[in-house]
Image (cartoon, coloured by chain):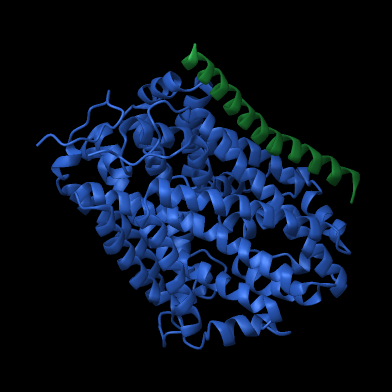
Amino acid sequence: MSVNAIVVMIIGMILLWGGLAASIFHAVRSSKTNKAEDLG
Amino acid sequence: MERSTWGTRAGFIMAAVGSAVGLGNIWRFPYVAYENGGGAFFIPYLFALLTAGIPILIMEFSIGHRFRGSAPLSFFRMSGKKAEWMGWWAIFVSFVISVYYAVIIAWAMRYTLFSFNQAWGEDTEGFLFNDFLQLTVSPGETGGIVWGIFIPLAIVWIITLGILLAGVKKGIEMANRVFIPTLVIIFLIIVIRAVTLDGAMLGLDAFFKPNFEAIMDPTVWVAAYGHIFFSLSIAFAIMITYSSYLPKKSDVTNNAFITGFANSSFELLAGIGVFAVLGFMATQSGVEVADVASAGVGLAFVVFPAIINEFPGLNGLFGFLFFLSLTLAGLTSLMSITETYVAGFTEKFGISRRKAVAFSGGLAALISILFATQGGLFFLDIIDYFINQFGVAALGLVEVIMVVWVLRKTKHLQDHANAISDIRLGGWWKFSLGVITPIVLGYMMFGLLRLNIFQQFETETGNYEGYSNMFTLTSGVAVASGALLLGILFSLGKWHKNYRYYDEHSEHPVREKE
């Protein structure tokens, strides 16, 4: 694989899979916060 | 009368992702990316995801969640009869898609079994068209029923309608909770095996190598927006229907981000898997990757079986996993497409879910037999083209223009989404919906109309795939226009008394008043 292709592959993975991970992380964090608020 | 709801947020997200992740993610995205600049395609693709895909998803999730109904009922509650027709149009587009989509899943199901002994032999193309599809008639002729397709087709409908009969929580949600993780695990196994094959790096290089000059070409941007649009199950009535089953307190904006990114993440995974095995195939045959790269039915049912034949070991298992992944991806999408009209008919006519599934699903299953005939592939091909371009894409353009510019509901939907979501919608969302999406989709639609009306395809007849004028008009144009006409016709009827009323402060806004 050429260097350009490897760089693009890594950037693509970071943006798409990272975007998914960040959105799921946000959902999990906000559900924990909501639960804590409900209990409080 | 209480409305069905999802059991959990994860259940809803699995179902929405299951709907978005379909056959196109596996057999369309890798080739579209490869043909449009390789790695450089990710730039317009990401722009399209953030300025059209996710904004429209947020809009549809907000409409469904705010007005709590199937697409026609949500539009009716939003703006009355002047919007309801769009919901019915979307439902009839979904109905048409479901009748042929089920047949492709039936093919994949049959190929899953063929994989064990590579029943397709050495001539995979001849096997598909002559032995399996028995394509011996001309376009427009049906010929006899092909029982080898009819039987798996019946199984596909029994599974789909059985899941829908079980309801939203116990049927759709449960099925997606099993199918989606299974699909991801199977595809991970495929990708891991694929990237360790000889020549895999050659394929990945072809897929990811960026051609930055391509992104200066407007057609590449249109291809990116077009792909995102078709890939995310938007303008199908699906996302409106699914979000209408969410409880009142739901973060619709973040749900849209998760769905959009999950769909794209799977596409990237599919691209890696597909091009790694194409690199292997090219190496084995001593040709360039460009010579084996293809998309759609040809990729799945001709090229992949040929690749499976060449596998160094466990050919049957690899083929089984690949076609099983197609079957699972197809089934999760088919159940979502079918749910749109089950929900619509239930609410419009006040009939039980069981009756709606039996009547509308049964009718779809009956019509789909047309595609299990010897001439079925021609009907499938032309209807797929016309209903996607002049059904889904046209509807998306009309939906965005109507909601943003004619009915002026952006502020209302924005306030609703912001009231229940952590991520605040602002100028980005309004500009994407009101300006970027209509311009890109409008440009795309203009090109499509010109291509079809002035018969500018590079074929003998100038029509799509060189089909005759008669076949194009009676099968393609008639079906796409029929979906719109039926949509308008259905919007003229009255809603059943149980669904006319709406209490926006209730957790279950659909209630009986009489």
Asked whether, in this view, residue B404 is left or right of residue B270, the answer is left
Q: Residue at x 53, y 71 (%)?
A: B465
Up-down relation of residue B194 to residue A13 (above or below): below
Asked whether, in this view, residue B478 is left or right of residue B108, the answer is left
Indicate the colour of chain B. blue
Question: Does residue B478 show up?
Answer: no
Which image quadrant: the C terminus of chain B? top left
* Image-quadrant location for residue B486: bottom left
Outermost residue on the top side: it is A40
Front-most of B510 and B431? Answer: B510
Q: Residue at x 53, y 60 (%)?
A: B330
* Residue B230, x across and y down, in percent: 52, 50
Which image quadrant: the N terminus of chain B? top left
* Residue B187, x across and y down, in percent: 69, 56
Outermost residue on the left side: it is B514
* Residue B313, x across and y down, in percent: 83, 72
* Image-quadrant location for residue B327: bottom right
Q: Residue at x 87, y 68 (%)?
A: B283
Q: Residue at x 65, y 51 (%)?
A: B184
Up-down relation of residue B213 to residue B285 (above or below): above
Indicate the colour of chain A. green
Question: Does residue B479 show up?
Answer: yes
